[in-house]
Amino acid sequence: MDKQVTVMGEKTLSMGEQDAARSTLWKALGPGILIACAAVGGSHLVWSTRAGADYGWSLVGLILIANLLKFPFFLYGQRYTAATGESLLAGYRRQGLAFVYAFLLINILTGTINIAGVAMLSGALFAGYGVGSLTVPQLGTIVLVLCALLLLIGRYRFLDTAAKVIVVLLAISTVAAVALAYGNRLPSPAAFVAPSPWSWGSIAFLVMLMGWMPAPVDLSAWSSLWMFSRREQTGHFATVRESNIDFYLGYGSAVVLAVLFMALGALVMFGSGVSFDKGGIAFSNQLVNLYTANIGEWSRPLILTAAFVTMFSTTLTSMDGYPRSLAACCVLIGELDTRRFQQIQHLWLLFSALAGALVMLCFVDNLLQLLSFAAIISFLTSPVLAYINYRVMNGDNVPAEYRPGAWLRLLSWSGMLFFTLMSLGYLYVTFIRN
């Protein structure tokens, strides 16, 4: 008989039951960590680093607030699925077909732009290996084709394994780089005047920063759908408790890494008089230089590989997540047999690769412009998707104990109000004030 474990005199789980619980928890881990993997490449490597480089430590509070206010809407994606056994998008369908159409249209727009943005940065980093006369859009297209092939062959199992390894390696290298940068930091020139991000002129950058911080809200549907893929892989469907742990691990990692990347930009570039270049290859070289400036020139090949693999993994997760969610929308709208899902997903996968390649050709000389546009669109759609997620989580089919409590309700409404006001402020500055 298994030995019983007691806590303060009260019998809890037996040793055998604890081992079984750990086993099922491990089988549940994956979707939340994949969200962290998708977040790190775009928002962290680009926007967090740039926030530190341009404004020093001024925006650390805003980064934490953005992560906090998006927290409930990402949580709802996995909690809803664990509590009801159906995807978050099926919850959209319960609220009305219009909500599914809204998600579909938003994702066709944001998906194409975001995939193109992360693929183009992957291509720019790949150019650092000296691949001859190939342009950044051509290299980005190669990345998209490779991602599509890997997903068609390896499917979710490959995606899950790669994400866990990449997040761990990136976390270790980033912690090391920040620690070295802190030890080697130099004082800013005496005449340097730190710019303030708290002005109308900076609102566009703040919106870009928060648009992908830690990721666009529509990614909450990805983790919901990935839970079903994880079940197919392991034979276990996560409980609410297990999905919460998976989510907290992934989301918490994304928050910590966001602060670390901002710190790296602040410690290495802030006050130096150097700003990020808008071109793809020059911009990617500056990202690599952030690490090598502290670790040493010997580390350049290693850091370049780590940065490329990070962006490649973000491209890979995006190439899986967007087509997966778009295919789910099509199945729900057409009330199709779920066996058609994979076929439709493959069609969206091919469409995403083609559309992403075409968009990259339009932004061949300005990577930051493409990434900026993608981040702004992601933020402007945040209030709509956040409201739908909140409404779905409060649906009659959700058991009362899993619906948002007082704290989550307050946080949800605060987030929706904040996203709306910031969006209106950006539209005012862009179309009226200027």
Image (cartoon, grey):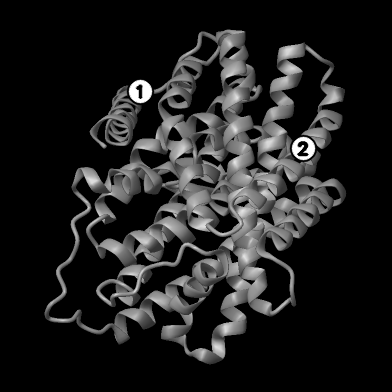
Badge 1 density bin: few <14, some 14–19, many ≥20, Cα 10 Å: few
Q: Is 80 rendered above or below residue 364?
A: above
Residue sitting at the far front: 434
Label number found at residue 351: 2
Q: Looking at the picture, how far across and down is residue 260, in whole percent? A: 38, 65
Badge 2 density bin: few <14, some 14–19, many ≥20, Cα 10 Å: some
Q: Is 431 rendered above or below residue 321?
A: above
Q: Check contact, mark 1 vs mark 2: CB within 8 A.
A: no
Quadrant containing the C terminus is: top left
Which residue occupies 38% across, 49% down? 209
Mark 2 residue element: helix
Q: Can residue 26 be seen in this view?
A: no
According to the image, label 1 marks what residue?
405
Which residue occupies 81% across, 53% down? 150
Mark 1 residue element: loop
Quadrant hosting residue 299:
bottom right
Which residue occupies 66% across, 63% down? 136
Q: How far apart are marks 1 and 2 (CA)?
A: 40 Å
Q: Looking at the picture, how far across and down is residue 61, in whole percent? A: 25, 51
Kind of residue at disc 1: Gly
Q: Looking at the picture, how far across and down is residue 339, in whole percent? A: 87, 24
Is label 1 or label 2 in front?
Answer: 2
Q: Which of 372 and 187 is in front in this view?
A: 372
Q: Is residue 365 left or right of residue 264?
A: right
Label number found at residue 129: none
